[in-house]
Image (spheres, grey):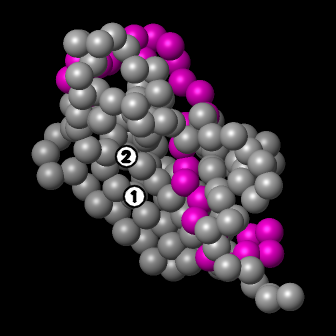
């Protein structure tokens, strides 16, 4: 399994600065499916306490951008990222081809949408890790996938 953790060049302006994804070797009849991991919920007080004018491009000029705020609040802290990577390595080492983490770039562009805002449909969906009995994380971890972006295991 390939594990790539990219650390920020300088200290980020918020602890919620790390994105995570994993590549599942075989998932729902598809090969090498990339799943983008995100925080499914968060404490409202933590969101209110952040310096949004620094975190989102143009935030002070045109008012709050709820979509861009979700991008940041869905990201992970250093500790959460490390715990999730450890969990994935221990639990799914034979099923995963890769785990990747990259830091967000600040300020986040206005208008970006959080992963939680995607609409599930044919080939597009979510994994809710809180419903997996073997998941011992205290993080409301979810994953977003789009099967349409990945080749089928067997062609018809």
Is 87 placed above or below 17 here? below
Q: Earlier in the sequence, mark 2 or mark 1?
A: 2
Query: For numbered disc 1, what is the local secondary structure?
Result: strand
Front-lying residue, 138 or 99: 99
Q: Is residue 5 visible?
A: yes
Front-lying residue, 54 or 137: 54
* Residue in the image at 43% along x and 71% along y: 3
Is 27 placed above or below 86 here? below
Residue extending furthest right?
A: 156
In the image, taking residue 137 as reference, residue 30 lies left or right, namely: right
Measuring from the top left, give residue 67's x and y in whole percent. 47, 27
- Cα separation, mark 2 vs mark 1, equals 6 Å
- Residue at label 1? 101
Measuring from the top left, give residue 27's x and y in whole percent. 74, 70
Q: Is residue 41 magenta?
A: yes
Quadrant where the image shows the C terminus: bottom right
* Residue in the image at 49% along x and 66% along y: 99
* Dot label at residue 18: 2
Residue 130: quarter of image: top right
Q: Residues within 10 Å of mark 1 (few under 14, many from 20)?
A: many
Query: For numbered disc 2, what is the local secondary structure?
Result: strand
Residue 22: quarter of image: bottom right
Measuring from the top left, give residue 110's x and y in whole percent. 33, 30
Is 70 placed above or below 77 here? above
Front-lying residue, 86 or 153: 153
* Dot label at residue 155: none
In the image, taking residue 109 as reference, residue 115 lies left or right, namely: right
* Residue in the image at 25% along x and 55% along y: 7
Q: Is residue 90 visible?
A: no
* Residue in the image at 50% along x and 13% along y: 44
Span shown in magenta: 27-55
- Determine contact: label 2, label 1, CB under 8 Å: yes
């Amino acid at each position: 399994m390939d594990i790539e953790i990219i650390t920020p060049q300088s200290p980020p302006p918020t602890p919620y600065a790390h994105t995570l994804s994993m590549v599942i070797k075989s998932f729902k009849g598809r090969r090498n499916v990339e799943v983008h991991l995100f925080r499914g919920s968060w404490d409202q007080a933590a969101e209110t306490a952040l310096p949004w004018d620094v975190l989102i491009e143009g935030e002070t000029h045109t008012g709050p951008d709820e979509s861009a705020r979700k991008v940041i609040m869905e990201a992970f802290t250093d500790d959460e990222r490390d715990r999730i990577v450890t969990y994935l390595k221990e639990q799914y080492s034979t099923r995963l081809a890769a785990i990747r983490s990259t830091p967000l770039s600040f300020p986040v562009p206005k208008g970006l949408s959080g992963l939680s805002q995607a609409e599930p449909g044919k080939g597009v969906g979510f994994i809710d890790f809180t419903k997996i009995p073997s998941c011992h994380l205290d993080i409301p971890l979810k994953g977003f996938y789009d099967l349409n972006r990945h080749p089928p295991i067997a062609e018809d």
